[in-house]
Amino acid sequence: MQASIYKWTEDLSVHIQSIDQQHQRLFELLDNFHKDITNKSSKLIMLGVIKALKDYTIKHFSEEEKLMKLHKYPDFENHKKEHQLFIDKVHEYEERYNSGKLLLTIEVINFIKNWIINHIKETDQKYSSLLIKNGVK
Ligand code: FEO
């Protein structure tokens, strides 16, 4: 078994267990994606891993948005916009790869990984205190 390259680390915690667990799952999916790139897996497998990452990201974003809305988080709209831009970008990668216009390389996955890390550190952290104050676990 190959060692994991991408791992969730404690400095990414938003101190809400349910959300930290979802972020951990995102890192597992990113790591699978990375392994399939380095192993030069087949197109069918690559399309499967990118779809799994996209689908889980959509699910996670929608759960986060539900919580932000429920707790009247003031910057909800901007946060949601960031989510949408990212989903659009991953979708575009998926389409371009599928039509042979893009190679899935370490640079592509690094872009995705860096976006997720920056988003968690900068944007997700901002809702943390409000949700914790309102008892979200
Ligand atoms: Fe955890 Fe805003 O994504």
Image (cartoon, rainbow, N blue to C red):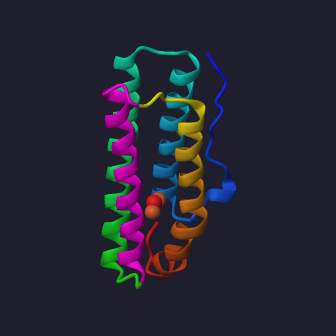
Number of marks in the rendered image: 0
- Pick the quarter of the image with the N terminus: top right
Magenta part of the chain? 75-101
Residue appearing at x 33%, y 44% in the figure: 91
Q: x, y (%) of residue 52?
A: 36, 35
Residue 84: say if magenta.
Answer: yes
| Main SS, magenta residues | helix
Q: Nearer the viewer, residue 120 or 102?
A: 102
Drawn side of residue 127 relative to residue 51, left or right: right
Q: Is residue 134 above or below residue 57?
A: below
Residue appearing at x 35%, y 83% in the figure: 72
Q: x, y (%) of residue 84?
A: 35, 60
Q: Is residue 76 above or below residue 17?
A: below
Q: Nearer the viewer, residue 90 or 27?
A: 90
Residue appearing at x 45%, y 50% in the figure: 22
Q: x, y (%) of residue 124?
A: 51, 67
Quarter of the image holding residue 85?
bottom left
Q: x, y (%) of residue 103?
A: 47, 27
Drawn side of residue 116 relative to residue 45, left or right: right
Residue 5: say if magenta.
Answer: no
Drawn side of residue 14 relative to residue 77, left or right: right
